[in-house]
Every structure is written in C-alpha cells, then in structure tokens.
C-alpha cells in the first residue's frame, strides 16, 4: 500500500499494511486510532477544536470533534471496532509565545477537546506527545499500530516510537 499522506483538515484509514503519515503538526493535533485485532487504523489531522464553536463551517475533518466521528465511521467500514481501538495523540504545540489569551491557545484547546471526545466515545488514550513548542511529524504503521514521531524544536530533532 505504501504511504498515505494526510494534509491539514483531512484523515485516512487503512488495513493491515502501509503507513499513514502527517507532517507539520504545530497547534494542530494528530490523532491515531488502531484496532489490533483487525489491524485497522486511521489518522486525523485536525486544525481546530470544536466545529460548533466555529459555526460548523466547511470541512468537518478540520475539527477535532467532527473529524473523529468521520474517522470512526471509516474505521468501522473496514471492520475495525472503535471501542477496541487504542488512541494516540500528538501535536497541540503552543506556537506563538506572545499569545496568552486562552481562546487563542488553539493547541491547548485541541488537546483538551481530543481527550474529552475520546473519553466520551469510550476510546482508550494509550500514548501522547503534546504541547511544548515546535512541529511534529507522525507515521502510523498499519501492520503494528506503532506510531513513529519526529519532533523539531529549537533546531533539535527528537524521534520516538509509541
């Protein structure tokens, strides 16, 4: 299957083989879901926390709450069970040090909404790398459910597998 690249406000799902990746997670969040039994997984790259707060405008995949619903639907179409799925959460960085208004701290709000929605949906959050400064790139391996994360902050590159 190769590699599927997910852009901002987009998502992708797959089964058994291949990589789903997304680049440049700053204040955006990348959420992966993976059902180990069926080897069905997916990745959402959400830009903003809640669709209703922004008037439900445009593409539902650009919001954490409505994007997760789309991701879950497509995982179910491939035979995955969201209640069995493990979630991993990345991004939510604080990109602008001169912003202190809570409403403008999009990264922090994205992480809070992601955790709240996962809990509401009964999906276990098993790993996270959120907050801080700098960008992240993540790669979901559909054969194992492992996520490789590459983080660049202040010129330092860190790689970890979750």
Image (spheres, rainbow, N blue to C red):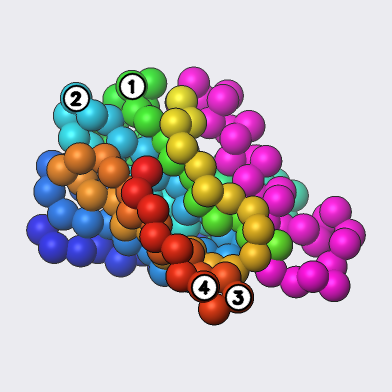
In depth, the one of 128 and 155 nearer the eye is 155
Q: CA distance from mark 3 to mark 2?
A: 39 Å
Give the dominant element type of the magenta stretch: helix, strand or loop.
Answer: helix
Disc 1 to disc 3, C-alpha distance: 38 Å
Residue 119, compared with residue 99, is above or below; it is above
- Snapshot quadrant of residue 37: top left
**How far from the left and from the top, in percent, is residue 12?**
31, 54
Q: In the rendered image, which residue does mark 3 sit on? A: 154
Side (left or right) of 152 relative to 160? right
**Residue that badge 1 annotates:** 84
Choose mark 1 or mark 4, whichever is in front: 4
- Mark 2 = which residue? 37
Residue at 45%, 63% (x, y): give it: 158
Which residue range is magenta in the image? 95-123
Q: Residue at x 57, y 60 (%)?
A: 28
N-term mark: 2 or 1: 2
């Amino acid at each position: 299957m190769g590699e599927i690249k997910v852009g901002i406000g987009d998502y992708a799902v797959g089964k058994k083989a291949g990589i789903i990746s997304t680049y440049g997670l700053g204040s955006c969040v990348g959420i992966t879901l993976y059902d180990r039994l069926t080897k069905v997984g997916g990745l959402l790259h959400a830009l903003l926390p809640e669709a209703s707060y922004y008037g439900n405008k445009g593409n539902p995949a650009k919001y954490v709450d409505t994007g997760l619903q789309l991701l879950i639907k497509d995982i179910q179409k491939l035979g995955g069970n969201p209640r069995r799925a493990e979630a991993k959460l990345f991004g939510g960085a604080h990109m602008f040090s001169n912003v202190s208004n809570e409403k403008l701290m999009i990264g922090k709000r994205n992480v809070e909404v992601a955790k709240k929605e996962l809990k509401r949906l009964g999906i276990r959050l098993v790993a996270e790398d959120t907050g801080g400064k700098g960008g992240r790139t993540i790669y979901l391996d559909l054969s194992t459910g492992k996520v490789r994360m590459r983080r660049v902050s202040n010129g330092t590159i860190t790689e970890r597998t979750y």
